[in-house]
Image: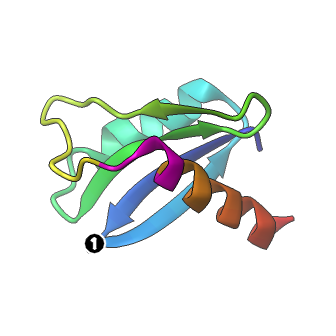
C-alpha cells in the first residue's frame, strides 16, 4: 500500500491504506459526505509527500502536513 488516507472519525485520527492514489482520493471524497468523518489528506509512502485534502467543504481542522505524515507512518508500522 503506497497511499495512506488520513481522516478523523468522531474526532479520532484514523488512517487507511490503498494501492492507488485514485482509490485513496475516492475514499476521502466519499468520506467527505459523512458528517462523522473529516478527511485530512493522503500520504504517499514511497515519495514521502503529503497531499492535503480540499473537498467541497474544506476541513475546519487545519491539520499540519507533518501530523498527517506521522499518523500515516504509524499506520504503516502497525500493518507491516
Left or right placement of residue 24 versus residue 47 in this view: left
Per the image, is 64 magenta? yes
Q: Quadrant of the N terminus?
A: top right
Measured as percent of width and height from the top left, residue 7 is found at: 40, 55
Which residue corresponds to the image point at 52% horizontal and 39% vertical from the top-left? 42
Q: Give the percent coordinates (x, y) of residue 16.
A: 58, 56
Q: In the figure, 25 relative to 71: above or below?
A: above
> Dividing the image into 4 quarters, which one contains the C terminus?
bottom right
Seen from the viewer's position, the closer of residues 72 and 9 is: 72
11 relative position to 40: left or right: left
Residue 34 picture quarter? bottom left
The secondary structure type at the circle numbered 1 is loop
Closer to us: 28 or 65: 65
Q: Residues within 10 Å of mark 1 (few under 14, many from 20)?
A: few
In the rendered image of this protein, does residue 22 appear above or below residue 26? above
Question: Would you name the residue on which mark 1 appears?
Answer: 11
Magenta span dominant secondary structure: helix
In the image: residue 12, left or right of residue 33: right
Give the colouring mode of the picture: rainbow
Depicted 44 relative to depicted 78: above or below? above
Identify which residue is drawn at 79% across, 33% down.
46
Q: Is residue 80 above or below residue 45?
A: below
The residue range painted magenta reads 63-67
Which residue shows up at 16% across the image and 29% down it? 56
Amino acid at each position: 500500500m503506497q497511499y495512506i488516507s488520513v481522516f478523523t472519525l468522531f474526532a479520532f485520527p484514523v488512517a487507511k491504506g490503498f494501492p492507488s492514489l485514485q482509490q485513496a482520493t475516492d475514499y476521502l471524497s466519499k468520506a467527505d459526505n459523512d458528517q462523522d468523518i473529516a478527511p485530512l489528506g493522503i500520504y504517499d509512502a514511497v515519495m514521502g509527500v503529503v497531499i492535503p485534502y480540499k473537498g467541497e467543504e474544506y476541513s475546519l481542522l487545519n491539520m499540519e502536513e507533518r501530523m498527517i505524515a506521522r499518523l500515516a507512518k504509524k499506520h504503516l508500522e502497525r500493518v507491516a
